[in-house]
Image (cartoon, helix red, strand yellow):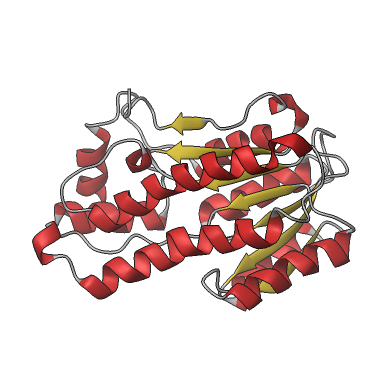
Amino acid sequence: MQATVTARAQGLVALVTGAAGSIGAASARALVSAGAQVLLTDREQQPLAELCSELGAGHAAYCVADVTDSLAVSLAVAAAVERFGGLDVVFVNAGVFGAVAPIADYPEDVFQRVLAVNVLGAFLVCKHALPVIRPGGSVILNSSVVGLTSEAGICAYATSKHALVGLMRTAMHEVAERGVRVNTIHPGPVDNEFQHSIEMTATHAPRERAAELFEQSIPLRRHASATEIADLVLFLATRESAFITGATIAADGGMSA
């Protein structure tokens, strides 16, 4: 990991869920490069250990946790506080997609799993983190462009991502007196394996063709990079966004406009 190049997040302690994914990892890198210390969580140890090693032991630590497990989430929050002395930023990023099917044919077990990870998981992270986050802190929930819109066949994913807006708006009112801010971000298609898998499932086309088809619906005609989403996370994590709360912030290339 390169030496810190900016002090925008100096002194902040962040918890990042879904840190093994591209957006989670890019956000962790952005936070550390800006001076923060980060507790990484995900379900698999190896990618967490590799990312932690890259970021440096003084800047990052990790805790294996399934966000649908309340005890595991509480232990991850406690680990951040114990290791780094507090908690200022929470990036609720862990998520799954599910299937593509009409509502009448949508597998019930898949629907339940998507809501368990995306909604219950986000609730549990907020439940355990909000009581200990320091005044002036920031909670960022990673929704999706389909948390503002939707398409046929994605009822579980769209429902879960819309639900995060309700959770965010409720949490925002509950912690505003402490100066804690809560916002959702709504990325459009990002150039990562998670998105490309969705595109191939939705279009039944090879990877490159599926990406081209999706880009036709993006006014900017391209996918975002994980780093571009991480830049937004960093902005919301710092005092640069001190008067932004209760917001649904689209980073979707114009898709929801």
Please tell me which residue is depicted at 64% across the width and 66% down the height of the picture. Answer: 41
Please tell me which residue is depicted at 48% across the width and 64% down the height of the picture. Answer: 120
Give the percent coordinates (x, y) of residue 202. Answer: 19, 53
Give the percent coordinates (x, y) of residue 71. Answer: 64, 77
Quadrant of the rendered image containing residue 115: bottom left
Q: 220 and 171: which one is in front?
A: 171
Please tell me which residue is depicted at 50% across the width and 38% down the height of the picture. Answer: 185
Q: 66 and 27: which one is in front?
A: 66
Please tell me which residue is depicted at 54% across the width and 54% down the height of the picture. Answer: 93
Determine if residue 230 is in view: yes
On screen, 102 above or below 255?
below
Determine if residue 57 is in view: no
Quarter of the image for the C terminus: give it.
top left
242 sits left or right of 83 in the view: left
Q: How many marks?
A: 0
Give the percent coordinates (x, y) of residue 105. Answer: 10, 65
Give the percent coordinates (x, y) of residue 45. Answer: 63, 77
